[in-house]
Image (spheres, helix red, strand yellow):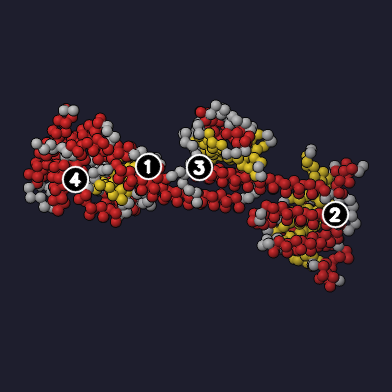
Amino acid sequence: MDSAIDAATMANLLDITGGDQGFVDELVDTYIAEGERIVGELDAAAAAGSVPDLVRPAHSLKSSSLNVGALQLGELCRQLEHDALGGAVADPVARASEVKTAFDAARAALLDERTSR
Amino acid sequence: MTPPAGDATMRPGRVLIVDDTQFNRQLLARLLQGIGHEPVEASDGRQALDRLRDLDQPPIDVILLDIVMPEMDGYDVLAALGDDAALRHLPVIVISGVDELDSVVRCLEMGAADYLPRTVDPAILEARIASSLARKRLHDAEREAVDRQAATNEVLAIMSRSAFDLQVVLDASVRAAVRLCRADYGVAYVVEGDAYRVAASAGGTDELDRWEREHTIKPGRDSVVGRVALLGEAIQIEDVQDDREYVATGQQVGGYRTIFGVPIQQDGTVSGVLALTRTEVRPFADAEKALAIGFAEQAAIGVANARLLETIDRQRGQLARFLSPQVAQLVSSPEGEALLAGHRREITAMFCDLRNFTTFSEMAEPEEVLGFLRRYHAMVGSLVVEHEGTLEHFAGDGIMVFFNDPAPQEDHAGRAVRMAVAIRERFAEVSDEWRRRGHILQVGIGIATGYATMGRIGFEGRYDYGGVGNAIILASRLSGEAEPNEILISQRTFAALDGDQATAEPAGERALKGFSRPLLVYSVQPMARAAEAS
C-alpha cells in the first residue's frame, strides 16, 4: 500500500537540515499542529460557501505538505487553490473533506514513521 | 572610493523571512542558519514592515517574501518597500511554487530581485541569497562612500573656513571620525610639554569628558594614547581586557572594549593622538581605520596651522621689540625710570590698519599670510626707524606709532605725515604683487596730535611702553574712517604742519565714536599733487 508520505522527500528533508532528526521531528510537529488549524479553516470557509476564503489555507497547506512529502495532499491543495482563485469550486464542502481525509492519512503516516523508528 | 572591507559575498547576512506559515519559517530559518546567515521571522507583511522600519533593531540585508499572506500580502509589501526611500534598495526574493509563475512575474515587475521555488534546495537558496547580498553590499558600499566623501568635504570646508582655529578643526575631525568609523566615543589628545591633554571629544558622557579633561597621558604602554604617542604608529586593541599592559583608568569610566588610536603627526613628529572606542568587542575594519587615519591627517594640518599662527605672533612680538630703539635707550638711561613712571606730553599718534586683512587671512594659505606679514612689518618697521617714531604695538594688522615721545621731536606732526605718505607709497608696491595673486589689500591711516599720558603699561614680565589720551583714540578712529589708501589727519595735526600744509586738503566734518561733536578732518594728498600745489 502507498504511504501518504513520500519517503524520498522525507529523507531529503532530513538531509538538507543536516541530518538532525530532532529538528525534523519538531518540524513535523509544527506541520501537524498548523495543518490541523488550516484544515479547520478550510472546513469553515467551505461550510460558509465562501470560495475566496479557501485560497489562503489551501496555499499554506500546499507548500508545507510538499516539503514533508505529503505529495497527494499537496496536489489536492494545489488544485483547490487554483480552482478557488478562478472562483469555480463546485462543491466546496466535498473538496474540503477530501483535503481533511488526505491530511489525516499524512498525519497518521508521519506519526507511524516516528513510532516505528 | 573606499572599498568595502573584505569580500562582501563571504560575510553572513541578516535575512528576514516573511511567511504566514510557521512550518515554512521554521524550515527556512534552519536552512539559512545552515549556510551561515542570521534568520529573522515575520508572520505577515505588516509585521515585516514594522521590523524593517524599527531603527533600534539591527538592519536587514535580504527579504524572503511569501506572496499569499493575511493582513498584508506580498504585493502590498513590495509596493510599500518601493514607496520607502530608506527600504527601496533592499533585495527581495519571492518564494513561490512552480504553479505560481504568473505571480512571480508580477512581483519581479514590482521590484523583487529574484524568486525561489517553494520546495527549497539549500544550494539554490545559498546561491540566491549570496547574489542578493552582494547586490545589497555593493549598494551599501556606494552609499557609505558617498556619505564618507560628504563628511570629508564637510571637514575640509570647516578647515578652510577656520584654518587657524585648532579647536574647530579638531572638533569637526573627531565628530566625523566617530560617526563614519561607527565608534561609540572619540577623543583627540594634543601634546603639551611632556604629556598629552584632551583637546576635543565626541559621543561620550559628561562624566567621561570630565575624566578626560582632568587627566593627562604620558607616552607609555599602559594606554592607547600613550602607546600611539610612544610608537608613533596606529594601534588597535581588539579587547582591552585581553591586553595585560593596558591599565588606563579612563577605561573604567568609559567602559570601552575595543580601541583604535592614530597619531596626529607631521614630518614624523607626533603632536597628538586621535582615539576611537567601542563599548563592545568589535575591531575596527580596514576601511574604518583608513578613514580614521584620514581624519588624523586633517587634524595634523589643523595643529600645524595653529603652530604657524603662534610663530607669526611670536615674530610679531620680536619685531616690535626690535623696532623700538627709543624705548630700549630710554630704559637704559638715568632719566628713564622717571619717564617710565608716567608723564604728560604733546604727541602725534599715527594708526595704520589693513582693509580686507581678515578676508585675506581666511582665504590665503597660512604660509602666504606669514610671508605677507613679514614683508609688511619689515617695510613699516624700517620706515618707523627712518622717521624716528616710537612703535607702540603691532596688534593683528594694526600698527600704532607715536612721535615726540620719549625722545623730543620739534616737527612731530610733519614726521608722522611724511612717514604715513611713505607707508602708503611703499604699500602700493607690496599690494600690487598681492593683487596679482588675487588678494586685494589696502591700507587706511589716521593721524592726530594732542596731549597724552605716556609711560610703562602692563604688568611684571610683560611691560609695554604706551600712552593714554584723546590723540591716540582719535588717530585710531581716523584710521577706521579713512577710505582705502587714504590718510586722514586731525585739525591740530594740520595746524602743526607749518610749511607742509599744502600737502593736505579739508575733507569735511566727521562724527566719530567717542567724540561729542563732529570734527574737521584733512586728507593728505599724494606727493605729486602736493608738489604741484606748492
| Residue placed most toward the observer, B208 or B471 | B208
Query: Do pointers 1 and 3 mark residues of a single chain?
Result: yes
Q: Where's residue B368, x and y in %?
A: 69, 55
Q: Residue tagged by mark 3?
A: B286
Q: CA distance from mark 1 to mark 4?
A: 29 Å
Q: Is residue B185 left or right of residue B310?
A: left
**Label number found at residue B385:** 2
Query: Do pointers 2 and 4 mark residues of a single chain?
Result: no
Task: Please identify the quarter of the rendering in which residue B221 is found.
Answer: top right
Task: Please identify the quarter of the rendering in which residue B13 is found.
Answer: top left
**SS at badge 1:** loop
Q: Residue tagged by mark 4?
A: A59
Q: Amino acid at mark 2?
A: Val
Q: Amino acid at mark 3?
A: Asp
Q: Nearer the viewer, mark 4 or mark 3?
A: 3
Q: Is residue B203 left or right of residue B321?
A: left
Residue at the far bottom in the pictured view: B532
**Label number found at residue B431:** none
Seen in the picture, residue B390 relative to B212 is either above or below; the reply is below
Q: Where's residue B250, x and y in %?
A: 56, 30
